[in-house]
Image (cartoon, rainbow, N blue to C red):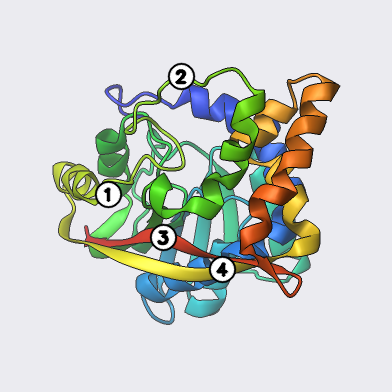
Amino acid sequence: MPQSVQPNTQQAALWNDASGKAWVEMQPILDGVLAPLASLVVAAGDPGKGGDVLDIGCGAGATTLAMARCVGNGGRCVGLDISRPLVARATERARVEAVANASFEVGDAQAYAFATERFDAIVSRFGVMFFDDPVAAFANIRQAARRGGKLAFVAWRGPRENDFMTTAARAAAPFLPQAPVLDPDAPGQFAFADGARVRRILEASGWSSVKVEQADVPCQIAEDHLMTYATRLGPVGAALREVDQATAEKITAALPVAFKPFVADGKARFIAACWLVTALG
């Protein structure tokens, strides 16, 4: 491990505890919600049959498994994630679904020692916005790419463009202490909202032919799953694990009203406003 690159200890603590466990529990729902984004990443990063692919921040493995099927038995896809619970879930899925050319490892891509292993493509579905030193992280990730290898990932644009993703937090805000003003560049869901900053990070870390393109992707979730989704994940899920019962009841009562504009015919529909980012190693 390079001495100049430090592991992301804060994110490791978060994703190996409550956040990681929540994502494991929510895996079937989340896979359904994010399926169009996984398809977008696979199409952008596909190196062709027989290619070797690395999936950064692989979570419970949906994108890794999809890419492994895409490259076929002559290729492979390795998923890397900082969360032991999520890697365990992904490994079990690969076994159950008999995807033999998919494998998973626990590791922090910001500091992981990739050694001599090289990949034709490196992809990520919302797994690269959490580095506390993104330039160092992407420089380290580039060491895993073969010369001219592809990079393809999706990241959220700003919260104002993703009103569905911020609805729960806005509905809960009146019942919680005032949140501190966050640094927009701090690790988190919307850390890559500024597309120009994403380009600067990649160019500073040695990637070339960088493209940062808008992707507006229709997504949906069954109405029956919506409140589980809203109360288990993100800042509201974290808050509900800490507040008293009376406050929790106020928040959960406010959520269905807040999400009502998105719901019709048994589904909540929204547009995922993202960046599709590609580059060459």
Q: Quadrant of residue 274?
A: bottom left
Distance from disc 4 to disc 3, alpha carbons, whole Å, reads 10 Å
Q: Residues within 10 Å of mark 3 (few under 14, many from 20)?
A: many
Indicate the position of residue 183 as horizontal and vertical percent values: 35, 26
Q: What is the C-alpha distance between the residues marked 2 and 3?
A: 25 Å
Residue underneath mark 4? 219
* Amino acid at the residue labelled 3: Ala
Residue that carries the numbered disc 1 in the rendered image: 142
Taking the image as shown, residue 154 lies to the left or right of residue 59, namely left
Looking at the rendered structure, the secondary structure element under dot 2 is loop
Mark linked to residue 273: 3
* Secondary structure at numbered mark 3: strand
Q: Which residue is mark 2?
A: 180
Residue contact between numbered discs 2 and 1, judged by CB atoms under 8 Å: no
Amino acid tagged 4: Cys
Q: Residues within 10 Å of mark 4 (few under 14, many from 20)?
A: some
Q: Which of pointers 1 and 3 lies earlier in the amino acid sequence?
A: 1
- 2 or 3: tag closer to the N-terminus: 2
Residue 211 picture location, percent across and down: 21, 63
Q: Amino acid at mark 1?
A: Arg
The secondary structure type at the circle numbered 1 is: helix
Residue depicted at x 51% and y 78%? 70
Distance from the alpha carbon under mark 2 to that under mark 1:
34 Å
Query: Badge 1: how crowded within 10 Å, few (<14), some, or many (20+)?
Result: many
Can you tell which of label 1 and label 3 is closer to the viewer? 3
